[in-house]
Image: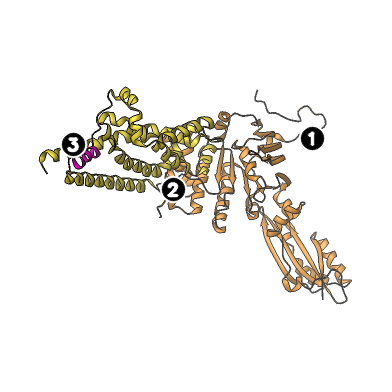
Amino acid sequence: MSPEIIRLIIQATGDTLLMVAVAAGLGTVFGLPLGVFLATSKRGELFAAPVVNAVLGALVNATRSTPFIILVVAIIPFTRLIAGTSIGTNAAMVPLTLAATPFIARLIEGAIREVDQGLVEAARSMGATPLQIVRKVLVPEALPAITLGLTLAIVSLLGFSAMVGAVGGGGLGDLGIRYGYQRFMPDVMGVVVAVLIVLVQTVQSIGDRLARRLNKRLRHA
Amino acid sequence: MNAPLRRDAFSVGAAPIPIAAAAIRFENVGKVFPGRSGQGSVTALEGIDLAVPQGSILGVIGRSGAGKSTLIRLVNGLERATSGRILLEDEDVTGLTEAGWRARRRTTGMIFQHFNLLSSRTVFDNVALPLEIAGTAKAEIKARVETLLDLVGLSDKSGRYPAELSGGQKQRVGIARALATEPKVLLCDEATSALDPETTQSILALLKRVNRELGLTILLITHEIPVIKEICDRVAVIEGGRIVEEGETFQVFTRPQHPTTARFVETVTGVELPAHLADRIRPTAKAGDNAILRITFTGENATAPVISRLSSVVGVDVNILAGRIDAIAGQPFGSLLVSVPARDPEFSAVLGALKSLDLKAEVLGHVS
């Protein structure tokens, strides 16, 4: 492999990591409050707003059921509005974030719904406000599950990021298609796949370890 | 504005209800849960009149579904009454908003059957939670939590997580947490139902201690009659959303009026006839039969030397069949099954002697 190709692989790995990191970060920033709201706004819950809950739930489902590659193309005007262009790594972060947000919101909703309702009742009996219950009870108690959810989201984003090559976004997927497939360089394709495998493994094992450390439920004296 | 509300303030001649002495008072309280789509509404509580005197321990006993969980949750606004009034220290809280309730809840601690401790927080941080919620300063939280952990005997577990504790230790953390904001009332929701008998005893002793030492009023709900027997000054029996009997524990236990109460107390006060006699017992006496008597000892009579009195003074042979003596709310209570000759004059002499000792005797039947 030529030094030029190696430089390209390093460049692409950096692009992928940047895209995934930004999408996961922004996806969490938007997805956490959305997920918390979805988990606490049905009838009789802390922030009861059943209609808003239903509308947001439908919106989340619609975004999640749109195939990612179609989403990327469909929101090009929006992408141009946000990133100033619809081509390149920066532009690719827009659809990635848009896909990550509802996915992360659902994962967080699930994690929070797993928290024992008895804890919510205990916090209410202490005079906690709904916001205090979220901050001091629901999120800390759901943190191990949220960590595992975010790990899953990051791994999925690594896969999604390979598709943004279709609209001129960079990254490992793009490199694999353009060099490995279109220019018949199977060795490049092999390296791309290998790097992706290593990335997924690394993310997964860091996530697992972090979740285990945060989980105080399984310890025994 | 906040002058004590007295229902009978303007009634003439009626005996005033001692409202001032009640920490918690229910007045004709009802709770109806609205029905889910297609189903009718459910009446959980109906016509509840109950007063918990300040500094006392009142136990509400009932089977599951009797409405006791709803009842206890009305006291801190986790459920709202649909009719009647609830007064906490003479203040009508029936119409409080959620914000009003939040402030009130800091004066009411609550402990739970499954402890409801946060698994992500250490023992220290669990006890600190209500203080954090109330916005207490860090230094004060530290001092307060340390005092509380000392009170419940868990100072050495401060940095542990709930998963590392036993059930009894978890409930001790629950109690420390409930006392953190220095409440005047403690609500116990089946607090010992998930614990083994020995641990139950130690938790009950702790509750009794905080009741005495801190002057805390305790309202507890349970389905376990030993809990009532052990620590409750008063007991209310709830069935089908209504209180069917209420009074001082010793009175209720020794003279139950309602069949449900009788069934509950039987398990701690009752003495069963041995099986070989239960099969042969008959209501009328034949010649040469022995009568089987149940003698009930209450209060100071519980220590009366009844057997020796019967044999020495009356001169009859007394055969002890079964018996038990126990303390109910701190007062001795016993029951003894004996057989004595059913013929007169011995039998009348026995009854006379028991009467002179002020003991309750009841003829269960006769055996040959």
Q: Which portion, as a residue range, is magenta?
A: A168-181
- To the question of a shared chain for discs 1 and 3, the answer is no
- To the question of a shared chain for discs 1 and 2, the answer is yes
CA–CA distance in space, label 1 to label 2: 50 Å
- Residue B3, position in %: x, y? 67, 26
Left or right: B362 in relation to B141: right
Q: Nearer the viewer, mark 3 or mark 2?
A: 3
Instruction: Please indicate, yes or no, whether residue B182 appears anywhere in the rendered image.
Output: no
Q: Earlier in the sequence, mark 1 or mark 2?
A: 1
- Residue A23, position in %: x, y? 32, 34
CA–CA distance in space, label 1 to label 3: 91 Å
What's the mark number on residue B155?
2
Q: Which residue is mark 3?
A: A11
CA–CA distance in space, label 3 to label 2: 56 Å
Residue lying at 79% horizontally and 67% vertically, measured from the top left: B293
Q: Which residue is mark 1?
A: B15
Observer-nearest residue: B182 or B213?
A: B182
Chain ID for yellow: A
- Residue B141, position in %: x, y? 44, 37
SS at mark 3 in the image: helix
SS at mark 1 in the image: loop
Toward the left, the furthest residue is A2
